[in-house]
Image (cartoon, rainbow, N blue to C red):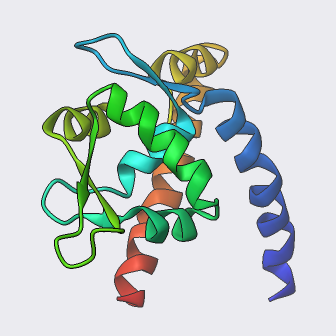
Amino acid sequence: MEATLAPVAEVMALYPRIYFACHTRHVRDEISDTRLTAHQASILDHLDEEHPIALGELADHMGVTSSTMSLHIDRLAGFGYVTRVRDPEDGRRVALRLTPDGSRVREQKTVLDADRVERLLGRLDDRERADAVRGLRLLADAATEMMKEET
């Protein structure tokens, strides 16, 4: 097992450098040109058009207070991405549901910014670029296999 410690440490050190250089900082709605922060976009990831979730439950899940989550939801509702509905069984509870526009924006979102990835790859010559992509493909394929085994 010791033989893998150096590669593990290297991947642990290298991956964040690539992620921080290339991750999406904002999500832009291609239709309305509204810009969302990564945190606002991550809230959309936790919502659904069909199955509402209680505001307090979402806040707990995301590790923030209900009042903080309420502020974020106010903004997202103002953009037309989220609706609030009162729980018919308990009028004190507010349930959140993603709107069709919210679903559309969620689908547009990507983890990495294509322009940044292009600039990063542009710093490599053809052979280095092919080697880098091959290495990532190997890791991605191994990740897929690992996830299959864990299900």
Looking at the rendered image, the quarter that the N terminus falls into is bottom right
Q: Does residue 49 sit above or below 133 in this rendering?
A: below
Q: Where is residue 58 drawn, in percent x and y?
A: 46, 64
Q: Is residue 82 left or right of residue 46?
A: left
Residue 17 sits in which quadrant? top right
Query: Residue at coordinates 34% horizontally, 81% vertically from top-left?
Result: 148
Q: Is residue 70 left or right of residue 98?
A: right
**Count of marks overlaid on the render:** 0
Quadrant (top left/top right/bottom left/bottom right) for the C terminus:
bottom left
Residue 81 spot, x, y in % from top left? 28, 35
Dividing the picture into quarters, in which one does residue 82 lie?
top left
User: Where is residue 41 drawn, in percent x and y?
Assistant: 44, 39
- 148 over 36 or under it: above or below: below
**Picture coordinates of residue 133 (x, y %)?**
51, 39
Q: Is residue 9 above or below residue 106?
A: below
What residue is rendered at 24% in x and 61% in y?
Answer: 86
Residue 132 in view of the camera:
yes
User: Can residue 111 be spotted in the picture?
Assistant: no
- Residue found 22% across the figure and 13% down from its top: 31
Please tell me which residue is depicted at 42% across the width and 61% down the height of the picture. 55
